């Protein structure tokens, strides 16, 4: 309505001006001001921490992807290319890299970004009291300033994934340099981050939205979009309804909502294999200081797999939008192998394995061992209808072999995320998903050194091996994979890791999604990849 009033008012001015000036036309009329280009996006949970060396949740990672920049970045094919570093040289057989920063780099507060900030960030990533979830990954690197725009990073052994690690977001030393790394989680920077990426932080309404503004001094040029608003919409159906109402421009579709958008000329639907997977994680260690009685025995975990018709679960959950997996690699990754043996649907074999493990059917059919009923809860993220359907289908299959499973939808940030980590490890089994890195390294998830723990200050440290999985053979293979420079040889190592993990079953692997994402045709420029839907969002345009 405001635009229509403005046009009518402008028309009146033009008529008046023509009457006054005869055939000379309008004089001195101001053009209609350009309407700001606003991109409205969704996240399915509120961010937790916007310091990338503190956060461990996907919503924070997604938002940080527009705020921060590293020395390198990936192109559409997943190759590592220049970002803050305009170029680099490799020497000493791949043990040393010398990076040359672009000229005139600035942080969002206008301060220069120099080699000091790079060295500061890389040192902080591996600091003993760092809360960075992959700090052990950076312990092998030594960063050294050669001059204000040149940084040398060296390592004892060549690392095939180093240029991926070099995408580490660079933080401002002038803000965080005086703050002990162990105190970063409590620092205001988590709520008011300053990076050097294409968009700068503007505001955060907890539980509602995070707003970013275009960074005028971004090295690659000011983004074409003026404002990005991340709206927190925890329910996917609600997100699609917001898309149809014009409140957001992009929404992930579920099998239930694809039909609402698929034939609508106002939207483009992108179908993209995802670099992620869904799984159920078993607690193999302690829960609140006590041994978990259900899943210590490998036979029980294998019985779980035999008891379930995985294809039927996937169909019930996501239709034809999921690819079954048996190991911790997505089919879109070069590390994926179709040769890893899975578990066919065989309830009789499941029952035999449970019997052999000492879990005998009780009077009501539910299995019992040492007086403990096999009656557990399966937490699943609330608002994720596909996961809830999958969990309910799984529960129905398991009950047929004597395992009682109650599906409990829970808020991810306030409840589920807290269950994962010490001191409690407060779960028996959890329905989860992982978004993966370009580097298929599984160190953080399955190496025994990556079981999280609580330090003396009460902060959680370590990696993401929250199922508390330990296998010396897997540890050794992971270490080999981190040093092997030949990709074909690395693939063989990853295949062997996958075979062992598939046999051990610390996870019950489910599917790797095929994402269906609807984009308003007001938005031009998306080129989604399996690695990044928002690839070069700074080059997109919005025309309403």
Image (cartoon, rainbow, N blue to C red):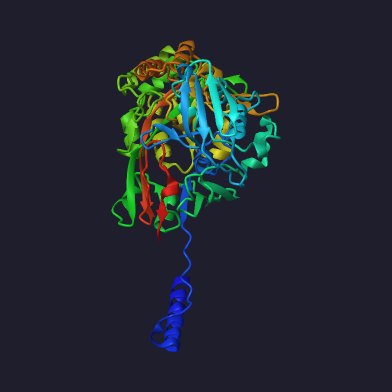
Q: Position of residue 256 (x, y in %)?
A: 35, 46
Answer with left or right where residue 405 lies relative to residue 177: left
Q: In this picture, is 2 found above or below 417?
A: below
| Residue at 46%, 30% in the rendered image | 405
Image quadrant holding the N terminus, namely bottom left
Residue 363 in sight in this render: no
Q: Position of residue 67 (x, y in %)?
A: 53, 43
Image quadrant holding the C terminus, namely bottom left
* Quadrant in the picture for residue 169: top right
* Quadrant in the picture for residue 364: top left
Q: In this picture, is 39 found above or below 77?
A: below
* Count of numbered marks: 0
Q: In this picture, is 101 found above or below 440?
A: below
Answer with left or right where residue 321 lies relative to residue 392: left
Q: Position of residue 245 (x, y in %)?
A: 42, 59
Of all residues, the one furthest to the left in this rendering is 263
Nearer to me, 132 or 300: 132
Nearer to me, 421 or 457: 457
Nearer to me, 536 or 463: 536
Residue 301 in sight in this render: yes
| Residue at 55%, 41% in the rendered image | 105
Q: Position of residue 372 (x, y in %)?
A: 53, 20
Nearer to me, 4 or 302: 4
């Amino acid at each position: 309505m405001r635009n229509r009033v403005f046009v009518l008012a402008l028309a009146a001015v033009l008529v008046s001006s023509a009457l006054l000036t005869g055939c000379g036309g309008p004089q001195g009329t101001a053009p209609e001001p350009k309407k700001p280009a606003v991109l409205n996006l969704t996240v399915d949970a509120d961010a937790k921490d916007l310091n990338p060396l503190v956060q461990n949740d996907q919503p924070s990672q997604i938002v940080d992807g527009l705020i921060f920049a590293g020395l390198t970045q990936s192109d559409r094919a997943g190759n590592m290319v220049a970002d803050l570093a305009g170029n680099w040289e490799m020497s000493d057989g791949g043990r040393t890299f010398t990076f040359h920063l672009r000229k005139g780099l600035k942080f969002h507060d206008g301060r220069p970004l120099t080699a000091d900030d790079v060295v500061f960030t890389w040192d902080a990533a591996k600091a003993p009291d760092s809360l960075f979830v992959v700090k052990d990954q950076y312990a092998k690197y030594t960063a050294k300033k050669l001059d204000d725009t040149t940084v040398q990073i060296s390592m004892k052994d060549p690392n095939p994934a180093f240029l991926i690690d070099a995408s580490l977001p660079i933080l401002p030393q002038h803000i965080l340099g005086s703050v002990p790394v162990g105190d970063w989680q409590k620092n205001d920077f988590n709520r008011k981050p300053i990076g050097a990426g294409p968009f700068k932080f503007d505001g955060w309404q907890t539980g509602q939205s995070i707003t970013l503004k275009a960074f005028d001094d971004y090295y690659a040029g000011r983004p074409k979009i003026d404002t990005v608003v991340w709206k927190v919409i925890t329910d996917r159906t609600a997100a699609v309804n917001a898309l149809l109402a014009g409140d957001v421009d992009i929404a992930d579709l579920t099998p239930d909502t694809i039909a609402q958008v698929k034939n609508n000329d106002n939207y483009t639907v992108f179908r993209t294999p995802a670099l992620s997977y869904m799984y159920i994680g078993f607690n193999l260690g302690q829960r609140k200081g006590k041994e978990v009685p259900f899943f210590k025995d490998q036979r029980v975990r294998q019985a779980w797999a035999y008891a379930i018709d995985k294809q039927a679960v996937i169909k019930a959950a996501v239709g034809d939008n999921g690819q079954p997996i048996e190991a911790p690699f997505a089919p879109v990754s070069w590390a994926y192998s179709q040769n890893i043996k899975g578990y066919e649907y065989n309830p009789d074999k499941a029952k035999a394995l449970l019997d052999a493990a000492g879990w005998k059917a009780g009077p009501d059919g539910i299995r019992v061992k040492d007086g403990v009923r096999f009656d557990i809860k399966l937490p699943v993220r609330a608002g994720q209808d596909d996961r809830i359907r999958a969990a309910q289908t799984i529960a129905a299959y398991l009950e047929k072999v004597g395992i009682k499973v109650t599906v409990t939808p829970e808020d991810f940030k306030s409840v589920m995320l807290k269950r994962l980590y010490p001191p409690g490890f407060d779960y028996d089994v959890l329905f989860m998903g992982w978004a993966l890195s370009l580097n298929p390294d599984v160190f953080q998830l399955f190496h025994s050194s990556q079981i999280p723990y609580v330090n003396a200050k009460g902060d959680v440290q370590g990696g993401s091996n929250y199922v508390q999985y330990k296998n010396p053979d897997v540890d050794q293979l992971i270490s080999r994979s981190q040093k092997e420079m030949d990709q074909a040889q690395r693939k063989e190592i990853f295949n062997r890791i996958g075979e062992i993990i598939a046999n051990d079953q610390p996870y019950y692997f489910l599917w790797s999604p095929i994402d269906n994402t609807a984009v308003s045709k007001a938005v031009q420029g998306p080129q989604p990849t399996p690695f990044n839907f928002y690839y070069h969002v700074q080059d997109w345009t919005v025309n309403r």
